[in-house]
Image (cartoon, rainbow, N blue to C red):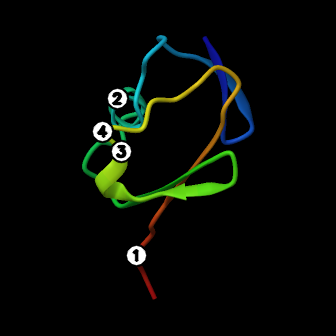
Amino acid sequence: MHIRLNGEDLAIDTGSTIASLLVHQGLAGRRVAVEVNGDIVPRGQHDAHVIAEGDRVEIVHALGGG
């Protein structure tokens, strides 16, 4: 199936969760915020939130520094 990830088209497996998407993108365990179709998905729901065909997903990385 196809989604839009950070403005780019991406093919992913049907039934993928946010957690599996983060693993696929090399972001597992990192401090990120995830938004699906304009709604923030809390970190505690990443394992359960299944991504649907055509979803718009935004992943924002937290950067440190001063």
Element at badge 2?
A: helix
Q: CA distance from mark 2 to mark 4?
A: 8 Å
Give the side of residue 18 with respect to residue 44, left or right: right
Q: CA distance from mark 4 to mark 1?
A: 26 Å
Residue holding disc 4: 47
Q: Residue at horizontal 25%, vertical 49%?
A: 29
Q: CA distance from mark 3 to mark 4?
A: 4 Å
In the displayed structure, 65 sits above or below 61; it is below
Residue holding disc 1: 64
Kind of residue at badge 1: Gly
Pointer 1 or 2: first along the chain: 2
Mark 4: few, some, or many residues within 10 Å (few <14, many ≥20)?
few
Kind of residue at badge 2: Ser
Q: CA distance from mark 3 to mark 2?
A: 8 Å
Q: CA distance from mark 1 to mark 2?
A: 25 Å
Please name which of the two marks, 3 or 2, marks the residue nearer to the observer.
3
Pointer 2 or 4: first along the chain: 2
Kind of residue at badge 4: Asp
- Residue 46 is labelled as 3
Pointer 3 or 2: first along the chain: 2
Q: Residue at horizontal 72%, vertical 31%?
A: 8
Kind of residue at badge 3: His
Mark 2: few, some, or many residues within 10 Å (few <14, many ≥20)?
many
The N terminus - image quarter: top right
Give the side of residue 45 with respect to residue 63, left or right: left
Q: Residue furthest left?
A: 29
Asked whether the beta carbons under mark 3 and mark 4 sit within 8 Å of each other, the answer is: yes
Residue holding disc 2: 20
Tell me where residue 48 sits by quadrant. top left
